[in-house]
Image (cartoon, grey):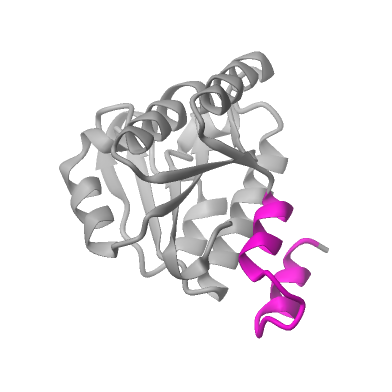
Amino acid sequence: MLDSKNCCLIVIDVQGKLAELMHQKDSLFKNIQILINAANLLSIPILWTQQCPDVLGPTTPRIAHLLIGNRPINKATFSCCGSEQFNSKLKTLNRNQLILCGIETHICVYQTAIELLETKYDVTVVADAVSSRTQENKNIALNKMQNSDINITGTEMILFELLKTAEHPQFKQIAKLIK
């Protein structure tokens, strides 16, 4: 079970024109927004990456406006783990349970998830908060990650897993995010 005191949300490369090409992009953006808002309510730290922003553009405004106070980690490698800045920030958080969302599922999300798992992190990918340009590529990546022992979940499921009880002080605010 996930514990909000041991989690970190990682928002991967939701940028520019590429983000607009994602399969079911409106649902993707909505679920990422819910995860970011929930992380803020539950005091879960957020790491935010951008893949070659000089080429792909900045994080889409629909996501970036929620990340005020955070600074993006710019990278060239597909896996976030290829960035020393990412690795350094992740290490200083001292969190073992990592929640991944973003794009593209079969490239940056997949490679990041596998490398984090190999370095002994507990990795969860939120299936309805990741996407690729095609549903097929997303499905292939999710199946491959699940077969590698990466946890696959959904936005609503993860919220209530983090809350654990309707008596949680943030329960009403979190519940409003999905209504």
Give the quarter of the image for residue 82.
top left
Residue at image coords 46%, 43%: 123
Q: Residue furthest right?
A: 179
Q: Position of residue 81 (x, y in %)?
A: 27, 37
Quick check: 119 above or below 31? above
Count of numbered labels shown in the rendering:
0
In depth, the one of 174 and 69 nearer the eye is 174
- Magenta residues span 155-178
Q: Nearer the viewer, residue 171 or 22?
A: 171
Q: Quadrant of residue 68?
A: bottom left
Q: Quadrant of residue 33?
A: bottom right
Q: Main secondary structure of the magenta part?
A: helix
Asked whether residue 160 is drawn in magenta, I would say: yes
Instruction: Residue 149 in the image: state x and y as whole percent.
Output: 51, 31
Where is residue 133 drawn, in percent x and y?
59, 21
- 37 above or below 134? below
Q: Residue at x 43, y 64 (%)?
A: 6
